[in-house]
Image: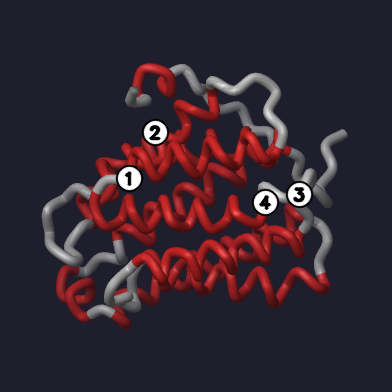
Amino acid sequence: MVSTKTINASTLSRMFLAGAKNLEAKKEWINELNVFPVPDGDTGTNMTMTIMSAAGEVSSLEDPDMETLCKAISSGSLRGARGNSGVILSQLLRGFTRVAKNLTELDTTAVAEAAQKAVETAYKAVMKPKEGTILTVAKEAALKAAELAPEMDDLEEFFAAVFKHAEETLARTPELLPVLKEAGVVDSGGQGLLEVMRGAMDGFLGKEVVYSSFVKTAGP
């Protein structure tokens, strides 16, 4: 029986790969949402290239511990980072793994702490952080995680509540960024982050995900 109160390296690896796979599956749709900062239709592609670089490294590890796994996620995503959205995603992953790598298992408190570090790291990496983007979705998810962690130890319920709040935040992005409202879309980077989270939740719940494309998509 898989514990729903802690995540070990094996579970985190499965969650990360499932998140990457879901993002890859949705990348064309995310590209179509892309109107900010410029409507060049590549947010989904850039985020996918970024996370797939890390997924390639993660999928080549044999029975990694938390530190080895976190190093592969962080270095792989930094190496593969493309475009604004990819850089922000890589910084979110870098921040998250900086907390996770020091632990053998993650509970709701550790996940909340790692999410907070992820947001801090990403905001610092952007010259002029803009609200109504992936940053806002990540920040609100981290705030909700911090609020819920002290009173919730079941990760399945915890993830569902954090995801719901992130989804509601994404739906509000057009109110925060007029260019999104004009185009009638939500922020593409925020949608991309949500798809990573959605896939990761599937991975946590043990839903079957096919990883065969990772090795050939990964860069050198």
**The residue under label 3 is which amino acid type?**
Leu
Say if residue 26 shows up in the picture: no
Seen in the image, is 94 located left or right of residue 63?
left
Q: How much space separates mark 1 and mark 3, taking CA atoms?
A: 26 Å
Q: Secondary structure at mark 3?
A: loop
Between 94 and 137, which is closer to the camera in this rendering? 94
Q: How much space separates mark 4 and mark 2, taking CA atoms?
A: 20 Å
Q: Which residue is mark 2?
A: 53
Q: How much space separates mark 2 and mark 1, taking CA atoms?
A: 8 Å
Q: How much space separates mark 4 and mark 1, taking CA atoms?
A: 21 Å
Q: Which residue is mark 4?
A: 100
Q: Which residue is mark 1?
A: 81
At which x and y percent is residue 1? Answer: 87, 34
Which of the 4 image quadrants contains residue 185?
Answer: bottom left
Q: Secondary structure at mark 1?
A: loop
**The residue under label 4 is which amino acid type?**
Ala
Seen in the image, is 189 located left or right of residue 91?
left
Q: Are marks 1 and 3 in contact (CB under 8 Å)?
A: no
At which x and y percent is residue 168? Answer: 48, 71
Q: Secondary structure at mark 4?
A: helix
Q: Are marks 4 and 2 in contact (CB under 8 Å)?
A: no
Label 3 Cα neighbours within 10 Å, binned few <14 / some 14-19 / many ≥20: some
**The residue under label 1 is which amino acid type?**
Ala
Above or below 162: residue 98:
above
Tell me which residue sits at (43%, 23%) in the image: 214
**Disc number for residue 103:** 3
